[in-house]
Image (cartoon, grey):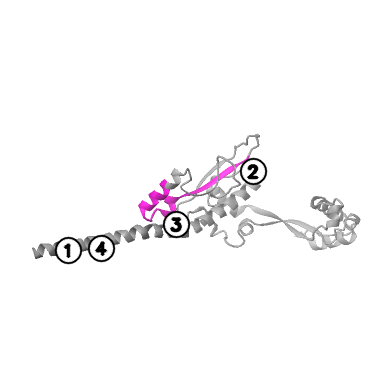
Amino acid sequence: MKATRLIVVCALSVAAVLMAIFCVQSVTTPIKFEDTRAQREVAVIKNLVDLRTAEVEYHHQKGVFTANLDSLLLFLKTAPKKEVMKEGSLTDKQLEAGLTEHKAVKILDKAKSNALKNKKLNLDPADKDALYAYIWENDAEVKKNGLSGFRRDTIELNMIQSLYKGLFDETTIDGIVEIPFSNGKRFEMEVNNDYKTSQGIRVPLFEARAPFESYLGDLNQQELVNLVDREQKLDHYAGLKVGDVYAPNNNAGNWE
């Protein structure tokens, strides 16, 4: 009897310990899952934002979006980025008189063209500083409109450096198309370049996606199943994404 009682006591003790462990895990596992998810999603969101930046520039230059990630990377590595370098600004008085940025640039362009045509001046088109110095000092229309010191030049910059301000170069930019913590999986890309609004206006759309399974697949499977099921029941995309190929949303992310 004593032996039997001892066995029962031991069994109950083990059961109590197992139950305690199970209770602790039932609380800590979801917390750990959500903490890890939050940490990983910071990196996933960063790449999605970087992809959005690339797609918006691609659309700006070509008029469409691309679902081909290799084409997008080639664009970033080879296409120039045109930017307007600005010096000086229009005063309130000039604006009230009807002078606009566009008109001011046209006046400057005409003055530069006239100066370069004057072979007696022997001005070098590449020496922008000397060219502006001359027209600021000598062109009647420039002086009349108070544009001395006003300068606008379109220059070509390295696309990657221009868009990402030194965060990437040609050797590291490939990383923006990969989903962090996914063992090298790429973002899912989809475009709809023929979408038209109810007014018949064509609005190209794109969507970049990272499903939960891609960057949370190595975590607790039951928690992952619960997360996916919860989002699907709410009619939400089960993951992170930017843009929408079914309706314009200003290329917003579903976390924004």
Residue mark closest to the camera, 4 vs 2:
4
Q: Position of residue 112 (x, y in %)?
A: 83, 55
| First reached walking from the N terminus: tag 3 or tag 2 | 3
- Kind of residue indicated by mark 3: Arg
- Kind of residue indicated by mark 4: Val
Q: Position of residue 131 (x, y in %)?
A: 83, 60
Q: CA distance from mark 3 to mark 2?
A: 36 Å
Q: Does dot 3 land on a helix, a strand or a loop? A: helix
Q: Does dot 2 land on a helix, a strand or a loop? A: loop
- Kind of residue indicated by mark 1: Val
Give, as a single range, the part of the protein colored magenta.
Answer: 203-229
Quickly name the residue at label 4: 17
Residue mark closest to the camera, 1 vs 4:
1
Residue mark closest to the camera, 3 vs 2:
3
Residue 124 image-quadrant placement: bottom right
Quickly name the residue at label 2: 63
Dot 1 and dot 2 residues touching (CB under 8 Å): no
Q: CA distance from mark 1 to mark 2?
A: 76 Å
Classify mark 1: residues with Cα within 10 Å, few (<14), some (14-19) or many (20+): few
Residue 19 image-quadrant placement: bottom left
Quickly name the residue at label 3: 37
| First reached walking from the N terminus: tag 1 or tag 4 | 1
Quickly name the residue at label 1: 9
Q: CA distance from mark 1 to mark 4?
A: 12 Å
Asked if 97 appears above or below 12 in the picture, the reply is above
